[in-house]
């Protein structure tokens, strides 16, 4: 038994069984949540490279979980330093599965979600780095039926996503191969620059960095909000982990000096593009799409702090700390959009005037998730954003000013949404509560988490920073 | 042999850009995989290079099965590739096919890609060695024309064909640097995955909704 078998093959196997049992929707959701929570528990507590006795009987032999699985000479390693990423991947997936039933997403979402989580883990585990590109493309292929389920017209955003992922995979594969030549001959600056450009282009394609971000709002508008938000959360998070690993693995051979500046520039462009486009977007799901672009920009800014300094653990803490508020915000936003549609409303901003008078709690969910992503005080995004701005302000004040403009765009989008939803419309709707109890339960849970994370950051930031310390330990 | 395979790849990729009939396209794609095999066999052992062709032909079969299931298989005499030129008009009353500016633009763009590919390949071959020139030209032609294909169209079938042109192009370039069996296997899986997803997207709108 080895750890990749538990976190890569086991979810794939459970997913396969659940595809066969997809008629029993409630059972599929229940098993999906339980299995991912079990994997989170194991990631937290299962010892590696030690004999453990599951049942305290002399006749039952003890088992030993190795941290390495070798396939065709290539190693998949999930050791103690992988625990933070394992916990984040499977905890995020289990939280997402919790709301899947009530969001009425396609039943295939659960088994495919398990496959995506398993493959994402494999991408982080594989050595050498270049094979991760092919595995990430496998994740993208599985995302296609999640974003475009059977019975739905082909989503052009999904096609564009597929194209960018395929080209990004191929570019990263060649860049990754040439990287080993640079490792052998680090004095060849000419080759090193070209390899960095190739790998940068590959990461830009698969992470949806400007100008390859166009599929995100298209997918957000046309796909099921809950499925698309899951992909929007997991995909950039996994690629971000890969970028962290890449930076740390290759710090010894020298990262080009301007990598940090390049990441900052791209981050600001993403924040400006996401924020300003959100301000003029006419579709509620489209606003979520642009908010995702804004969030990718925030991640790039966090990674830029890492790239242009020596190993500084707090800088990694920013990237890890961003994941929790993002997870809660996107889940609440996507659930609110699903409930909005279930209440019979269109997602076009022009057609939802006065909707908050009928579904006030759902509308509140939409608005506060927008404000939370924008980093307004008392919401989950605020503590990490304020810390990030403080760190950037000393070295790159212009970056903070431009990023603030993008943030204002997102705030404007939230205010526009709020004003449209509460305004009096021609039908003269009276204020009343029409949400179902189950919907209120999930929405209230989301608000509560947003506010707890926003007002009591000391409860979660140290844990996430510790995760960052564990994650980068082997590189120090 | 190298010149023959280069001409074959240039012709097949340009033909894929022009034809829309799914039967013709799959046939041309299968021939293109033969060209890919011929080029890669210049730098890889025969046994490993043939994996590319077999994986490609299986991918073609997947798309063909999806096509037959979705559109049926009309009699061969009904197949008229010229009436299916992209951007072209349907045949007029006399049944004569007609060319349009769209096709001419496509062919012109393909010509430009050919010239650019040869130009870039000449520059790159100074770094990698003159021996690799034909392999570089072949890879760059497929990547360039595949990019044109995915840029010009928006239907899942054509985009699958475009991706199945781009990825073998990268495979040809990758073959210069590495002959790993595992990568060959993974890339064969990538080709199959693209074909499967393409077939799925062709069928998805007609499939029974599971929601």
Image: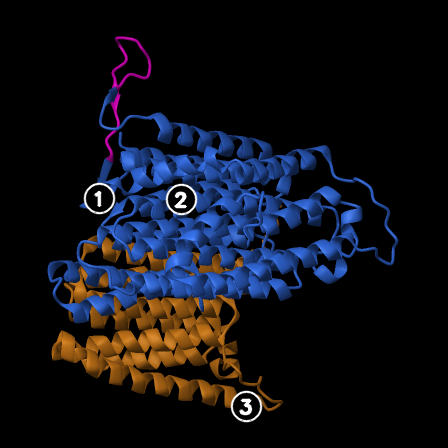
Magenta-drawn stretch contains A161? no
What residue is shown at x 62% (from left), y 63% (from top)? A279
Q: Is residue B140 above or below residue A254?
A: below
What residue is shown at x 47% (from left), y 46% (from top)? A384
Residue A177 in which image quadrant? bottom left
- Please name the residue that numbered disc 2 is placed on: A320
Chain under label 3?
Answer: B
Q: In this view, does A146 lie above or below A351?
A: above
Rendered hue of chain B is orange
Tell me whether marks 1 and 2 sit on the same chain. Answer: yes
- Please name the residue that numbered disc 3 is placed on: B96
Q: What stretch is highlighted in magenta?
A: A52-67
How packed mark 1 is, by other alpha carbons closer than 10 Å (few <14, some 14-19, many 20 or more), is: few
Residue A247 in which image quadrant? bottom left
What is the x, y in percent for residue B75? Answer: 51, 72
For the colour blue, the matching chain is A
Magenta-drawn stretch contains A58? yes
- Please name the residue that numbered disc 1 is placed on: A476
Q: Is mark 3 on a helix, strand or loop?
A: loop
Q: In this view, does A309 lie to the left or right of B104?
A: left
What residue is shown at x 52% (from left), y 69% (from top)? B155
Q: Is the magenta stretch mostly helix, strand or loop?
A: loop
Q: Is residue A24 above or below residue A243?
A: above
Kindly report the distance in space between the C-alpha atoms of the residues bearing marks 2 and 3.
Answer: 64 Å
């Amino acid at each position: 038994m080895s750890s990749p078998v538990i976190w890569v093959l086991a979810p794939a196997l459970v997913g396969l069984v659940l595809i066969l049992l997809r008629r029993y929707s409630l059972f599929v959701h229940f098993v999906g949540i339980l299995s991912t929570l079990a994997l989170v528990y194991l990631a937290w507590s299962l010892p590696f490279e030690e004999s453990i006795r599951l049942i305290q009987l002399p006749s039952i032999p003890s088992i030993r979980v190795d941290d390495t699985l070798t396939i065709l000479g290539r190693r998949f390693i999930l050791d103690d330093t992988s625990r933070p990423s394992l916990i984040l991947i499977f905890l995020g997936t289990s939280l997402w599965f919790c709301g899947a039933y009530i969001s009425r997403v396609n039943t295939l979402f659960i088994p495919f979600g398990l496959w995506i989580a398993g493959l994402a883990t494999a991408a982080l585990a594989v050595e050498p780095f270049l094979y991760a590109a092919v595995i990430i493309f496998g994740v993208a292929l599985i995302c296609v039926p999640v974003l475009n389920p059977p019975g739905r017209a082909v989503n052009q955003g999904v096609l564009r996503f597929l194209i960018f992922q395929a080209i990004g995979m191929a570019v990263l594969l060649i860049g990754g191969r040439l990287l080993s030549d640079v490792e052998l001959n680090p004095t060849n600056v000419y080759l090193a620059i070209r390899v960095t450009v190739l790998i940068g282009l590959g990461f830009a394609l698969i992470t949806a960095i400007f100008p390859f971000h166009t599929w995100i709002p298209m997918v957000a508008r046309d796909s099921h909000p809950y499925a698309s938000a899951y992909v929007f959360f997991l995909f950039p998070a996994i690629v971000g982990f890969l970028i962290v690993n890449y930076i740390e693995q290759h710090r010894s051979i020298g990262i080009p000096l301007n990598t940090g500046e390049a990441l900052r520039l791209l981050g600001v462009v993403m924040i400006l593009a996401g924020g300003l486009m959100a301000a003029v977007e006419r579709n509620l799901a489209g606003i979520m799409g642009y908010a995702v672009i804004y969030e990718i920009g925030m991640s790039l800014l966090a990674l830029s702090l890492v790239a242009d300094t020596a190993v500084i653990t707090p800088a990694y803490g920013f990237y890890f700390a961003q994941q929790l508020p993002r997870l809660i915000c996107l889940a609440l936003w996507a659930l609110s959009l699903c409930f909005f549609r279930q209440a019979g409303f269109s997602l076009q901003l022009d057609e939802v005037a006065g909707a908050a008078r009928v579904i006030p709690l759902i509308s509140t969910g939409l608005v506060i998730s927008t404000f939370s992503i924008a980093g307004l005080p008392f919401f989950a995004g605020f503590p990490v954003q304020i810390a990030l701005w403080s760190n950037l302000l000393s070295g790159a004040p212009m970056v903070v000013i431009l990023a603030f403009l993008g943030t204002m765009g997102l705030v404007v989008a939230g205010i526009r949404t709020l004003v449209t939803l509460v305004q009096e419309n021609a039908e003269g709707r009276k204020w009343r509560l029409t949400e179902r109890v189950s919907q209120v339960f999930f929405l209230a849970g989301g608000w509560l988490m947003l506010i707890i994370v926003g007002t009591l950051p000391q409860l979660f930031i140290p844990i996430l920073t510790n995760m960052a310390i564990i994650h980068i330990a082997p590189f120090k | 042999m190298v010149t023959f395979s280069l001409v074959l790849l240039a012709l097949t990729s340009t033909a894929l850009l022009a034809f829309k009939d799914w039967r013709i396209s799959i046939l041309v794609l299968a021939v293109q995989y033969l060209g890919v095999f011929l080029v890669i066999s210049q730098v890889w052992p025969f046994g490993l290079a043939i994996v590319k062709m077999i994986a490609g032909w299986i991918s073609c079969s997947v798309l063909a099965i999806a096509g037959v299931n979705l559109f049926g298989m009309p009699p061969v005499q009904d197949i008229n590739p010229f009436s299916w030129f992209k951007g072209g008009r349907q045949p007029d009353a006399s049944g004569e096919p007609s060319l349009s500016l769209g096709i001419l633009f496509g062919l012109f763009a393909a010509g430009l890609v050919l010239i650019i590919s040869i130009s870039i390949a000449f520059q790159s071959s100074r770094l990698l060695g003159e021996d690799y020139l034909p392999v570089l030209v072949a890879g760059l032609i497929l990547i360039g024309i595949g990019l044109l294909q995915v840029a010009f169209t928006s239907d899942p079938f054509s985009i699958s064909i475009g991706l199945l042109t781009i990825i073998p192009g990268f495979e040809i370039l990758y073959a210069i640097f590495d002959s790993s069996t595992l990568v060959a296997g993974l890339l064969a899986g990538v080709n199959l995955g693209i074909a499967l997803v393409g077939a799925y997207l062709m069928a998805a709108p007609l499939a029974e909704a599971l929601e």
